[in-house]
Image: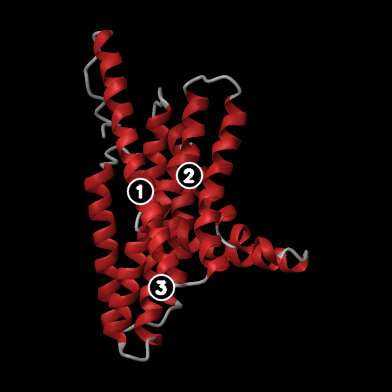
Amino acid sequence: MKNLYWLSIAFGLVVSGFFLADRRFTEVGLIGALICVGLTLGLGWLWFRPRPVWQGILWGALAQPVVVNLNDQMVGISNKLGLTFLDAAFYSPLPEETIKLLGVVIIVAAFKNVRHPYQAAAVGMAVGLGFDAMENVPFILNAAIDNLDGDLWGVIITGIGRFFTGAFSHALYTGVAAWGVGKLYAGARHGYWQVAGFWLAGIALHTLFNGATMIVGDWPVTILVIALITWTLIIWGLRFMRKQDRKYAAQRSENSVPTKDPEYSF
């Protein structure tokens, strides 16, 4: 599995190189994109503290350029089938959550000894964090060029908007989806069905996020409500993960095992 992981990373690096080389950008746009990436990864590392899962952050960051082409293909398929009303699900949630969860499965199989679902969810959150950081780059680069009020204003408006409305949204989606992988590795009954169920739950959350703006529109009130719901779920998820970590550490201490899991500690 380690060979498969590194082969996938090499493929992602090649695709990312072509993806970025094909884009026009200004110096202001590039600086703004790098600042946004740094803020996302820095705050994510501080809040999520995904210590063992740099492999996940790397997978997520390199998966984003790869999945852009898949998104376009999915839209083409939905249009040919006359299912344009499902674009909210087809355009990004289905291919993105599939590629990210595939990374979780490979990372867990190759590097991690998962004994509790929250440990797989930690990997999923790291994958989502890398994806979040990379996803903002093309939006900010394009805003610097397209905004009629100037490249700096375009970077500021887009960067703040992207960060405020869901800087860690993909960490949420993939953390939920990865919980099923953790259930499977922890020996839960009907483990494969749980993998499928939590994968669909991650897709559903992502679809609701996308569909809200597609149905209601990009009104300020809509964006504010979406941001509040997203951040509420993220904060709740962090609190839940830390509670699970303390509970698992207490169980291990009762069995005379070190009280902290150095790999998955939150």
Mark 1 and mark 2 in contact? Answer it, CB < 8 Å: no
Rendered view: 62 above or below 26 = above
Q: Residues within 10 Å of mark 3 (few under 14, many from 20)?
A: some
Element carrying mark 3 = helix
How far apart marks 3 and 2 lie (CA) works out to 24 Å
Say which label, 3 or 1, has the lower sequence index.
3
The x and y percentages for residue 143 are: 38, 80
Q: Residue at x 40, y 53 (%)?
A: 229
**Amino acid of disc 3:** Phe
Q: Which mark is residue 139?
A: 3
Q: Which residue is mark 2?
A: 103
Task: Judge left or right: residue 246 versus residue 208.
Answer: left
Element carrying mark 1 = helix
Q: Which residue is mark 1?
A: 232
Say which label, 3 or 2, has the lower sequence index.
2
Please name whichever residue, 231 or 24, is drawn nearer the observer in this view of the structure. 231
Element carrying mark 2 = helix
How far apart marks 1 and 2 lie (CA) works out to 26 Å
Q: Residue at x 53, y 55 (%)?
A: 208
Task: Judge left or right: residue 196 versus residue 63.
Answer: right
Q: Residue at x 35, y 59 (%)?
A: 133
Mark 3 and mark 2 in contact? Answer it, CB < 8 Å: no
Say which label, 1 or 2, has the lower sequence index.
2
Please, which residue is most extreme toward the top here?
255
Task: Judge left or right: residue 254 versus residue 65.
Answer: left
Please name whichever residue, 172 or 109, is drawn nearer the observer in this view of the structure. 172
Q: Residue at x 33, y 81 (%)?
A: 154
